[in-house]
Image (cartoon, helix red, strand yellow):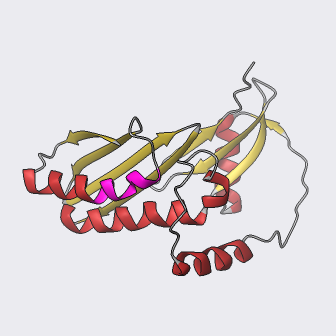
Amino acid sequence: MRINLIERNYTASERLIGILEKKLNKLNKYFDMNTDAYITLSKEKQESVMEVTIPFSGAMLRAERKGEDMYSLVDEIEEILDRQIYRHHKRLENRLKSDAFADSELAHQEEEEEEASRYDVVRVKRFAVKPMDTQEAIMQMELLGHDFFVFTNAETNEVNVIYRRKDGNVGLIEPDYED
């Protein structure tokens, strides 16, 4: 795996870079050598922020953590990525190396069974998707107290989703139909 380091308002020490490489190289058993991992290290106010994104074969693993110390964030990021791989290993099996799960640990298998049972559909809602502009959709989402709102965009006549981001801002998901 090739590691690409991006630093924003932060300069990583050689020690931190070495630790990052060592931790991420543990994931090499899952990825081909030409897979890129993008690590963004930044400082926002008094918080350190670490993001790791690993795009591969049409899929993507991503982990982000904030905290006081970059060194403690490395372990958290590694744990998140490891959990994502094992949680979704059935779906990822065809995209990862063919022998990626040859030595799976029993602890992860138990965790997978718990995770699989957690995703049963317990309720189905049906509602009319009303044409409106994005500002009206944001207002509706806030009035309902939800974190997202599905609507038909009056300008494009397509189904869109407005959602609240972790940073408090609002995001818009628009469909992109591939030809």
Quarter of the image with the C terminus in it: top right
The region drawn magenta spans 23-30
On the image, the x and y values in percent for residue 24 come to 32, 55
> Please, is residue 88 above or below residue 105 in the view?
above
In this orientation, which residue lies closer to the viewer: 63 or 107? Answer: 107
Left or right: 179 in relation to 167: right
> Please, is residue 80 above or below residue 5 in the view?
below
The residue located at (48%, 48%) in the rendering is 169
Left or right: 49 in relation to 59: left
Quadrant of the rendered image containing residue 158: top right
On the image, the x and y values in percent for residue 86 come to 55, 65
Q: Does the magenta stretch include residue 174?
A: no
The residue located at (18%, 60%) in the rendering is 46
Quadrant of the rendered image containing residue 112: bottom right
In this orientation, which residue lies closer to the viewer: 28 or 144? Answer: 28
On the image, the x and y values in percent for residue 164 come to 56, 52
Magenta span: predominant SS is helix
Quadrant of the rendered image containing residue 116: bottom right
Q: Is residue 167 visible?
A: no
Quarter of the image with the N terminus in it: top left
The residue located at (20%, 55%) in the rendering is 45
Q: Can residue 49 be seen in this view?
A: yes
> Please, is residue 34 above or below residue 170 in the view?
above
On the image, the x and y values in percent for residue 99 come to 54, 54
The residue located at (85%, 41%) in the rendering is 130
